[in-house]
Image (cartoon, rainbow, N blue to C red):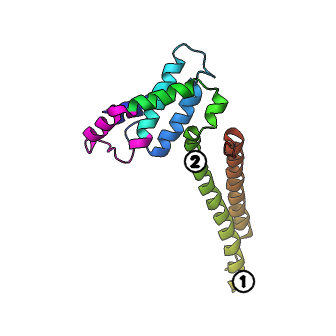
């Protein structure tokens, strides 16, 4: 019951992953934070999406898509005070400036998923470049004639694609650090 309702508050369907939950929350928290949104219903919407995020992150692995396995135990635990504590924390965050909210560990946890995807893309790009260069060199050394020689145009094309992928990944990484900061709050 709660899982489906909270996923819909974040604009997600029942097949959403934990990374999807974090990304959706980050976007909605920015949209509804009272420091950035002056609409009269913004604080309540911020509290609702923060409550939904809190539940989903806390119980994501124990929630099944159909909501049947362990559902009553989660409901009892959530209703026994966890929900009230989540709403109180959300009210506290709603009362802070957005720049301060972004520096909290609570919000910073949503950035981890984004950065890990960027690091993964960087590794793939570097591997692509390495394999392209290594393959060209090995094939050049082992070619027994002009028919077996590697295509220079093909090598340049593969290298270009790898470098393009690397450049885009680096731009996303720099943007991520610029938008979210990379130092921990002291």
Residue 174 visible in the picture: yes
Q: Which residue is mark 2?
A: 112
Percent x, y of residue 145: 71, 84
Q: Is 52 rendered above or below residue 105? A: above
Q: Which mark is residue 141?
A: 1
Query: For the point 55% across and 47% down, which residue is it?
Result: 113
Q: Is 32 rendered above or below residue 171? A: above
Percent x, y of residue 1: 30, 33
Residue range corresponding to the magenta coloring: 57-82
Which residue in the rendered view is the most extreme toward the bottom? Answer: 144
Residue 10 visible in the picture: no
Q: Which mark is residue 162?
A: none
Which residue in the rendered view is the most extreme toward the top? Answer: 40
Q: Is residue 30 left or right of residue 66?
A: right
| Disc 2, SS | helix
Q: Nearer the viewer, residue 133 or 20?
A: 20
Q: Nearer the viewer, residue 57 or 160?
A: 57
| Mark 1 vs mark 2: in front | 2
Q: Nearer the viewer, residue 14 or 6?
A: 6
| Disc 1, SS | helix
Q: How many residues crowd around disc 2 within 10 Å: few (fewer than 14), some, or many (20 or more)?
A: some
Q: Is 135 rendered above or below residue 35? A: below
Query: For the point 31% across and 40% down, which residue is it?
Result: 74
Question: In the figure, residue 87 lies in which quadrant?
Answer: top left
Percent x, y of residue 141: 72, 83
Q: Nearer the viewer, residue 32 or 98?
A: 98
Query: For the point 60% across and 20% down, which residue is it?
Result: 37
Q: How many marks?
A: 2
Q: Quadrant of the C terminus?
A: top right
Percent x, y of residue 34: 59, 21
Residue 113 is covered by the magenta coloring: no
């Amino acid at each position: 019951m709660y899982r489906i309702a909270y996923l819909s508050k974040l604009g997600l369907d029942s097949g959403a992953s934990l990374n999807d939950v974090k990304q959706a929350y980050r976007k909605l928290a920015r949209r509804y934070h009272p420091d950035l949104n002056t609409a009269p219903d913004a604080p309540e919407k911020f509290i609702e999406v923060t409550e939904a995020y809190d539940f989903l992150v806390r119980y994501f692995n124990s929630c099944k898509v159909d909501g049947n396995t362990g559902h009553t135990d989660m409901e009892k635990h959530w209703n026994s005070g966890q929900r009230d504590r989540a709403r109180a924390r959300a009210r506290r965050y709603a009362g802070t400036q957005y720049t301060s909210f972004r520096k909290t560990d609570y919000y910073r946890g949503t950035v981890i998923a984004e950065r890990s995807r960027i690091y993964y893309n960087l590794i793939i790009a570097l591997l692509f470049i390495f394999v392209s260069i290594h393959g060209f060199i090995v094939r050049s050394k082992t070619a027994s004639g002009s028919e077996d020689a590697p295509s220079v145009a093909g090598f340049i094309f593969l290298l270009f694609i790898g470098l393009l992928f690397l450049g885009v990944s680096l731009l996303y990484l720099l943007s991520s650090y610029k938008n979210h900061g990379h130092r921990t709050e002291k």
